[in-house]
Amino acid sequence: WSAISELIANGLDAGATKVNLYIESIDKKNSILEIIDNGSGMDYDDLSTKYALIGRNKRLSSEDLSEKTKGRKGIGKLATLFLSKKYYIVSKKDGIASAWMLDSTDALDSDIPELVRVPIDDVHIENTKIWDEIESGTLIKSVGVNLAGFAEGKLESLKMTLANYYLLDNLGADIEVAYRTDVNQAIEFSKVSKVIGFKNFYAFFQTDKTVVNMDLLNDSVKISADLEEVSNKLRQVKRIYPSEISRISLTGKEEFLNIDGELEEITYELTGWIGIHSTINMSEALENTGTDTKDRFIRNQVYKANQLRLYVRDKLAVSDFMPLLNNTQAFGAYIEGEISFDVLDHDRLEDISTTNREGLSGNDERITLLIDLLKPIVNKLISERANIGSVVRKEVDEIRRKEKKALEEKRIQEEEAKKIAEEERREAELARKTAEREKIEAQQKQRQAEVAKEVEREKRLVTEQELKITSKPMSLS
């Protein structure tokens, strides 16, 4: 998609306020891409001297409309060759439209691609309504584009990726995208916009208070932990400003070797913002961002939000600058930011961008300067996140310590209670046995008493009988 971004950048350089990207993928292996901008357009001279020459420094021309021209190498044409072997250019300027075709299908590697003028009707413009409504502009149509690996579900990620190719707030222009996969499907354009999980940041730095509206951030966020009660606790978001970071000067002057081979004092300035996320787990981040699509933190196979994006002249130069900082700390993966350092592409200095404009040559003193500026900022953010992580872990450890202590105390209490219960059981058993013994003894005493009483009664009866016998008078014979 970097090739598409180059083509969009061409329109923005031409002063466009609107760029439409249309993708028709009914036959994925032979898809059609159409890019329309309402910029200044091109006449024959523009086409032959500007657009058709690869490697020309566009910013050396005094005719450029944009103060911040997006490209130096002028590789817009080369970008289309990444997409397909055949494409059309239709341009409208001063009410006059012309169409051109470049077909390198059968060309050799050593051949120089040639633009051939063709009738406009040969182009078969897909979005005629948009094209007819603009007074001036350029239309690029690539045919036979192989999009076999592109699924409709990736469209939102494509739009977010395209949005990240630019600092949209600085453009003064809109980019709209339409994706069509069925012949009966209506063409519907939707606006490209950045999706940044500002509400998921725990600590946030910006070079100036006006770079980002701080209302986009939460006042407090949740930091995930092993215990729910700790995870649900709100942590105050840290807002960090340049005055809080020592050893950095966001703007200044340095001597650089200019294009004439002489040392020249050049002003540099670092602008933008960098934040560190509370979490990089999408489901956990929802606790902070909610479900609003514009506030989501997104990290999947197609789109990765947690990157330090470097912009030069409002266009993405490096998608993730973090590897150049050689930061191996675990929380380095939690960093996201958008920074600008235009001295990397200064008109008076050598171009340090790579041939495909997707990166920067690392062996340059400007890159070293940028690294020196960024390291203290990133280290401060990582330190803040590490500190709150330590606090969270200590809270978890303290709760678990208390829980362990409570469990131990409960165990001791239960053992004591068990001992007491056992003692009481033994005492009760002893009392029962004693009572049983006493009962038996009482019963035995009662039986003995009854026996003695019976013996006494029998003795008394015998005595009485004997008395009766002895007292009876003797009879005379």
Image (tube, helix red, strand yellow):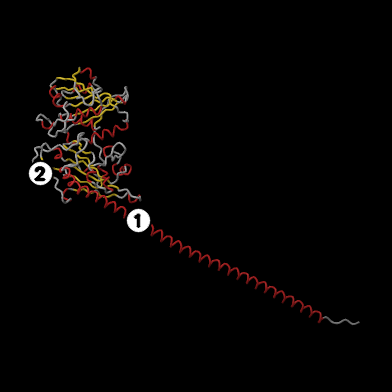
Q: Which mark is residue 439?
A: none
SS under mark 1: helix
Q: Position of residue 171 (x, y in %)?
A: 17, 34
> Compared to 56, does 324 lie above or below?
below
Closer to the chain start, of discs 1 and 2, is 2
Comparing 371 with 413, the one in front is 371
Q: Position of residue 310 (x, y in %)?
A: 20, 40
Measuring 15% from the left and 49% from the top, which residue is drawn there? 248
As rendered, which of 107 and 346 lies closer to the eye? Answer: 107
Q: Which residue is mark 2?
A: 255
Specify the label residue 399 is tagged with: 1
Q: Residues within 10 Å of mark 2 (few under 14, many from 20)?
A: few
- In this view of the protein, which residue sits in the foreground, 426 or 59? 59
Residue 440 to residue 326: above or below: below
| Outermost right residue | 477
The three-letter amino acid code for the residue at tag 2 is Glu
Q: Amino acid at mark 1?
A: Ile
Quarter of the figure with residue 476: bottom right
Instruction: Answer with the quarter of the image where residue 18 lies.
Output: top left
Give the residue at x 68% y 73%.
450
